[in-house]
Image: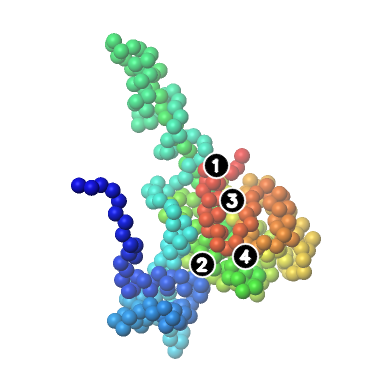
Amino acid sequence: MRKGFVFTPYSAPEQSPFDRLFEIFKELITHTSGDFDEAIEWLRVLDKEYELTTPDYTIDDFVEDLRKKNFIRDKTGQEGSGGAEITAKMERAIRQHALEQIFGNLKKSGIGNHRTKYSGNGDEQTGDYRQFHFGDGLEKISMTESLRNGQINNGMGEFQLHERDLVVEESFYKAQMSTVLMIDISHSMILYGEDRITPAKKVAMALAELIKTRYPKDTLDILVFGDDAWAIEAKDLPYLEVGPYHTNTVAGLELAMDLLRRKRNTNKQIFLITDGKPSCVIEPDGSYYMNSNGLDKYIVDKCYRTAQQARKLHIPITTFMIAQDPYLQQFIQHFTAANQGKAFYTGIQGLGQMIFEDYQANRIKRIRG
């Protein structure tokens, strides 16, 4: 018999007509901010151009299957409105789709925790050994190394194993992380024909699903900021849209710090996704001071002071700047220095991978010194 490799032409995995359309539909429903009717209209356009369906399975059949599988339902509370809306099951499917799309290189883990560089109680081994101490569990003893010590210390003639021969393999301390993800929804996120809000939404959905499934002991709060800032739930992300807002970075940071003050975890961090300069602050009397022309010193200085305040609370800010303007990058550099955090200058394509890598890196160390 001959041995070796046999190369054959690639054949795509077999998918049902529903599954093929469902993959496209999940992408469209994200871009349309949860608008089912608009997503289906786009699907019909794509069907005409690329012949996605057959006479045996049409778009109408697909819609009917979505209803049967409880991914959509008829709109409620709107007499005569007609149409359909997505369900909570569809919202979960969109988050899972974002997770697979952005963090698809992750391998499954049943533990749901993450290690730090510090040793302590945990189940991931460091490869280092120490002497057995009273109170250490028997399951922690490295029998191979302990027997080896017994042979070296006591000889092979009459083998004995003493307490001094026992060694324990160190394990990583399991840390917990509290993260606030800030998303800029000011008007500039859709300016110049570039959709920046959809990648930001996808990252937020993927991060929410990642933490829920792999690191359930971690916490993730999501907030959006324009003229004001407010917290949203992960289930609200598919419907998130940009508004006619200025950029009130200070309000977002203050809300983020307020959310993190309530967390008991030692490790806390803020992820800030933005593409524009701060252009708005709220005055003590509740009025808004706005200036979109250049970098207003009054607004910028408030951003720096807020970043310093977060630093005093041991909350690092990682900024993901999805704009390439050197003028704005200079502001981000000063902002990052004030917080002693980090900044990444990235396009919308690499945003998800960069956030994942930074989240992983921060989870391996104690952020608070």
At label 4, counting other C-alpha atoms closer than 10 Å, the crowd grade (few under 14, some 14-19, many 20 or more) is many
Q: Which mark is residue 216?
A: none
The extreme front residue here reads: 2
Give me the C-alpha separation between circle 3 and circle 1.
12 Å
**Lower position in the chain sequence, tag 4 or tag 3:** 4
Mark 1: secondary structure: loop
Amino acid found under the numbered disc labelled 1: Lys
- Residue 150 to residue 71: above or below: above
The residues tagged by marks 4 and 3 sit, at their Cα atoms, a distance apart of: 17 Å
Residue drawn at x 51%, y 48% as measured from the top left: 360
Which residue is tagged 4? Answer: 184
Residue drawn 45% across the image and 61% down it: 101
Quarter that holds the C terminus: top right
- Which sits earlier in the primary sequence, circle 1 or circle 2? 2
Q: State how far apart marks 1 and 4 are (Cα).
A: 28 Å
**CA gap, disc 2 and disc 4:** 13 Å
Name the residue that disc number 2 marks: 237
Which residue is at a point 32% across and 68% down the rendered structure image? Answer: 15
Residue bearing mark 3: 269
If you read the primary sequence from the N terminus, does the residue marked by circle 3 or circle 2 appear first?
2
Crowd around label 3: few <14 · some 14–19 · many ≥20 (10 Å): many
Under circle 3, the secondary element is strand
Of 201 and 52, the residue lying toward us: 52
Extreme-right residue of the structure: 297
Residue type highlighted by circle 3:
Gln
Residue located beneath label 1 in the image: 365
CA distance separating discs 1 and 2 = 29 Å
Residue 36, above or below 179: below
Say which label, 3 or 1, has the lower sequence index: 3
Q: Amino acid at mark 2?
A: Leu
- The answer to which quarter of the image holds residue 71 is bottom left
